[in-house]
Image (cartoon, rainbow, N blue to C red):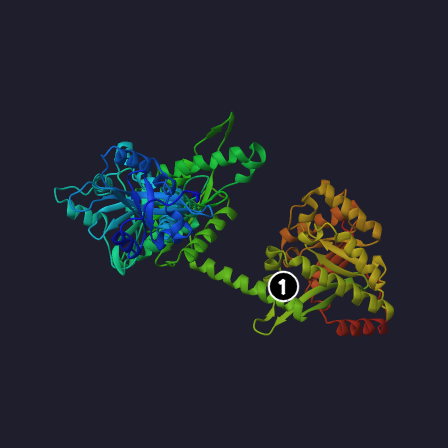
Amino acid sequence: MLALATPPPTAPPAAAAALLDGMPHAAWLVALQGQTVVAANAAAGALFGLPARSLQGQTATALVVSPEDLAWWDAAAGGDAGRLESDTVVLTADGRALHVRRSIGLVTVADGPAAHALVVLCDRSAEHAAEVERESLLAELQATLEATADGILVTDLGGRVRAFNRRCGEIWGLPQELLQRNDGDALLDWMARRVLPPLQGPDYAARLNALLRAPLASATDRLELVSGQVLERVTRPWFGGGGPQGRVWSFRDLTERVAAQERIQALTLHDALTGLPNRRRLAECVAEAAADARRAGAGFALLFIDLDRFRQINDSLGQEIGDRVLQDVALRIQGCLRADDQLARLGGDQFALLLRPADAAAAEATARRVLKVVAQPCSLDGAQFTLTCSIGMALAPSQGTEMDDLLRHAEAAMRSVKSAGRAHYRLHQARAEGDRRSRMKLDHAMRQALVSGRFRLQYQPQVTLAQGQVVGAEALLRWRDPELGEVPPARFIPVAEESGFIVAIGDWVLSQAVRQAALWQQRGHALPVAVNVSALQFQQPQFVDRVAGVLAVSGLPPHLLELELTETILVHDADEALQRLHALKRLGVRLAIDDFGTGYSSLAYLKRFPIGKLKIDRSFIDGLPGDDSDAGIVRAILQMARALGMKCIAEGVETEGQRQFLQAEGCEEFQGFLYAPALDPLSFEQRLAQADLRPPPPPRIRLVRP
C-alpha cells in the first residue's frame, strides 16, 4: 500500500512533465537524489487506483518492490545502474496484484550527469491470465496424453517430431535414454528399424515416408513389429493458424486382442477336447475339396466314424477316462492318415474323415486302417479294454458335394453297419436312402392321419371250432390315405414302432375298441374284444392306469377286454413285466400271447405269467394239413397250452382242411377268411344278428388220437 503523507519534492522541468502525460503507459520520474517520485502521469495513477499527484513524493521502492528493483536502485545510488526491463508484480491501492512489464532507465540531459530515472509500467494482466490459461490447458493436455493407453506422436509438415507421450515410447520399446533425450530423429530412426520389414537404408527421408505415410484424409491400418507386437496406426491431420500444420499419429497395442481373437477363432473352428477341426471347419474343408474336385475332375470321400458302445466307457470308468479315450482315438486315427486327409470331431464319440482325392477303393482302404488302429487294446489307469468303431462312407461328387448331404449319407451307412453287428464299414447306397425318405414320408402322413381321423377299426370274428359260434372279435387297424391309398398295417406299423408313434396309435385303438365293445354290450352282444398291444406301449409307466381309465370311462366290464401281447414283452425286464401283467389281471382284463412261436418263447417265463390264451401265428397254419413241419409245430403248441391250462386260437384259417385239422387236434377257437374277414362295426353287428337267428349246429365229434 502507498504512503500518502510524504511531502512533494521539487517540481521537475516542465518538458519532463509534458512528456510523461503524453505516454500511453503508466510512467513516473524519480529523482536519483533521494530516490523519490517527482512526477507521474495519469496512467500511473489509474494503474494504482490513486490520483496521479498522490504518487509524487513516494520513494521508488515503495511503488515497485522486488529484489530486482531494490538491487537496481542500490546500483543507481552508487552510480552504476544500467537498464532494467523484466516482468514483475505491483499492488494497487485496493490490494490487487497486477502483472506488469516494468522498464527503468536513467534520464540524461545534454551531456550532464543523470539526475532522474524514468519508470514505465505496461499492464499485462490480461496477457498473463491468457498465459496461465494456456499453461493450464497445456498441462491438462499433457496429463491427458500421458494418461491415455495409446501412444501419441505429433509431426509437423516436414515429418519432424514435435511431441510424443511416454506411452508411445513404451509401445515402441524406446530405450530409457532416448526417452530422456527427447530426440525426435532418434525416435523415428528407432521406429523405422522396429517395423516389419525393417526400414533400412541411408535415405532417411524415404524411411520416414514409409513409416509415416500421410494421406490427406484420416486413415487407420496395422503395423507388425519385429517383437511380434501388432499395432493399430491411426492418423489425423493437424490444423491450426488457418491451415495444415502437420499430423497426429496414435498407436494402439493390439497384440493381446489379436491373440485373443485368434484363440476365439481357433475355438470356433476346433474341438476343445481333441484339438481337431469341428463341424464348422469341416464344412469349410468340404467346400474347398468340392471346389478342387470341380477344377481337377477328381472325387473325394467323407467317412462317418462312430465308436461302438462308447457309453459303457463313460458309465463304468467315468467321463474323465472317456475324454482321454477320445483324445487317444483321435491320435490313433490321425496316425494312419495321409498328409491331405482331414479328421474332425463332430461331437460325442463321432468323428468325420475327409479324404481327398479318393474313390471307393481308397475310402475302403482307409476305413480298414481306421478299424485296425481303433481296435488296438487300450490301457488307462489300470483299466484294460478294446474299442471298435462303425464307419459309413459317402463319395463325392456322385453322392453330393455339400457337407450336410455327404454326412447324412455317411451316417446312414454307419447306422446300417450298427444294425448289422458293428465294427465294420459300409458305403452309402442310394436305394437305402430312398427307403429312408419313403419311411419319413410315411411317418409324417401317419401322424397327420391320427389328427385328421383317417384311421378306422375293423373287427374280425373269433369263432369256436366245435360249434362255429362267434365268441369274440379282434380289433384291426386300417388306414386309407388321400395320397397313398389303402396302406396295409404291415407297412406302417413297423414305421410307427421305430419312431415311437405306436404308443399314440395304440392308445387310440384301445379307446376306440373299448368304446365299441361297450356299445355292443348295451345292444345285447357281450363279446370280448381283443386289442393288440405293442412292446413299447406296454412298457409305458402309466399303461395299466391308462387301461383302467379307458374301462372306467366306457363302462365296459374288464373281462370283455382282451390284450394281445407279443412274446418280446415277456423277455424284456421279466420282473417288471410280471408285475404289470398281474396288475392287469387284477383289473379283470384277459391276457393273450399274439403270434406265438415266432418270437423268443420261454416256458420258464410263460408258466409264471397270468396268460389265458395263446394265438397260433398264421405262418404255421398256412401249410396245414399237408405240411408235416407245420403240423408238428401246431400239435406241440396245443399240447403245451393244455399243459399250462391255456386256450388256443388259430389265426389265418382260410380252408376247411385247416379248420378240420385244428378241431381234430383240440384247438378251441379260430379266426380267418374261412368264416369272415375283418368287418366294419355295422357289418360285424349284422353278422352277429344273423348268427343269433340260425339254429345251433349239431354237436361235432372230436377225434382223439390213440
**Could you tell me how many numbered marks the image carries?**
1
In which quadrant is the N terminus drawn? top left
Kind of residue at badge 1: Pro
Whether residue 491 is situated above or below residue 268 in the rendered picture? below
Q: Please give left or right for residue 105 compared with residue 562 in the image.
A: left
Name which residue lies at 79% across and 72% down: 685
Determine if residue 625 is in view.
Answer: no
Q: Please give left or right for residue 246 compared with residue 51 in the image.
A: left
**Residue 254 x %, y %:** 36, 45
Q: Please give left or right for residue 64 compared with residue 382 in the image.
A: left
Query: Where, by quadrant of the figure, is residue 97 drawn?
Result: top left
Whether residue 187 is situated above or below residue 471 in the rendered picture? above
Q: Please give left or right for residue 466 compared with residue 115 in the image.
A: right
Q: Residue furthest top?
A: 382
Disc 1: which residue: 489
Name which residue lies at 43% across and 43% down: 2
**Residue 290 x %, y %:** 33, 56
**Residue 560 x %, y %:** 82, 60
Determine if residue 205 is in view.
Answer: yes
Mark 1 lies on a secondary structure that is helix
Residue sitting nearer the eye, 270 or 427: 270
Residue sitting nearer the eye, 65 or 421: 65
Residue count near mark 1 (Cα–Cα under 10 Å), binned few <14, some 14–19, many ≥20: some
Residue sitting nearer the eye, 458 or 255: 255
Name which residue lies at 43% across and 33% down: 376
**Residue 660 x %, y %:** 73, 60
Residue sitting nearer the eye, 6 or 677: 6
Q: Residue furthest left?
A: 202
